[in-house]
Amino acid sequence: MTEPYQSDWARLLLGDSFHPGGTALTEYLGTLLSLGSDQRVLDVAAGQGASAIHLAQRFGCSVLGIEYSSVAVENASQAVLATGVAHLVTFEQGDAENLPVPAASFDVVLCECAFCTFPQKAMAASEFVRVLRPGGRVGLSDLTRKGDIPADLQGLLAWIACIADAQPLEDYVHYLTEAGLTVQLETVCKGFKMGLSLGDAEASGSETRKSNFRCFLARTRSPCRADGRR
Ligand SMILES: C[S@@+](CC[C@H](N)C(=O)[O-])C[C@H]1O[C@@H](n2cnc3c(N)ncnc32)[C@H](O)[C@@H]1O
């Protein structure tokens, strides 16, 4: 489901950076990932390209953004022309669950506020591992939920806002671990402006627990097989 991200509603909800925390949070994740000019980064579900462009500007890394929506790819490809990093950043249309890149060809996979929207999350996680070189890292940020998501937060706008299929924290860890990654760090992204929060009333109805937006840092556990799969 990618067309809704082209709508005015998406921009209203998410701003130019299509995730809570904006480019400040992207930069935080880039620092956690120790990005540098010698790093090749794959931004999975790159959206309008804001994160890929920011990372190249801030860390000097090269970035390929893969994005399902061809309209977004076109927008991102246009946007990068007006920056000083057009030689470092490219965008291609593709599916996170079947990434159009060779095995073991990236140092870092970044996936911001998109993993929760993938229908086949295990397949996407195993694609992250396939495309990473041995010792490569994954930086993932997503909304986590506690308890069930209320029915009125399961519609299209909630999907756009990465709420509708947000997973419990332990499920993200499970997907990454099962794919062959060691989750090294998870942190609540405190101090970042959160555009969204999800309250799920507890049984008593008196207390509301909020969801968190979390960053996950994960690392490949063992060298890839020749075909890159595990
Ligand atoms: C909330 S936006 C996040 C975009 C970007 N990562 C950011 O933080 O600005 C989610 C994006 O995921 C893309 N997307 C959804 N499913 C995808 C898939 N299977 N493969 C590639 N991109 C996908 C959507 O088109 C949309 O641009």
Image: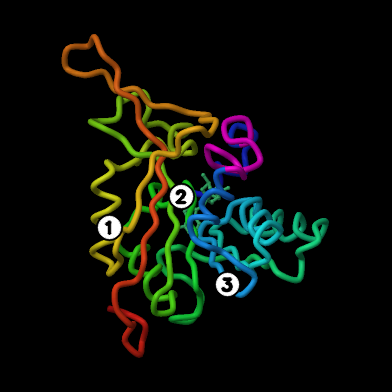
Tally the marks.
3
Q: Quadrant of residue 78?
A: bottom right
Q: Residue at 59% across / 63% down in the picture? A: 65
Camera-side residue of 217 and 10: 217
Camera-side residue of 151 and 170: 170
The image shows residue 183, relative to residue 210, as above or below, that is below
Judging by the rendered image, the residue that carries numbered circle 2 is 114
Q: Quadrant of residue 90?
A: bottom right
Residue 28 at x, y percent in the picture: 54, 48
Q: Amino acid at mark 2?
A: Ala
Q: Residue at 36% across / 31% down in the picture? A: 154
Secondary element type, mark 1: helix
* Image mark for residue 39: 3
How many residues crowd around disc 3 within 10 Å: few (fewer than 14), some, or many (20 or more)? some
Highlighted magenta segment, given as a residue range: 11-24
Task: Quote the CA–CA distance across marks 2 and 3.
Answer: 22 Å
Which image quarter is the C terminus in?
Answer: bottom left
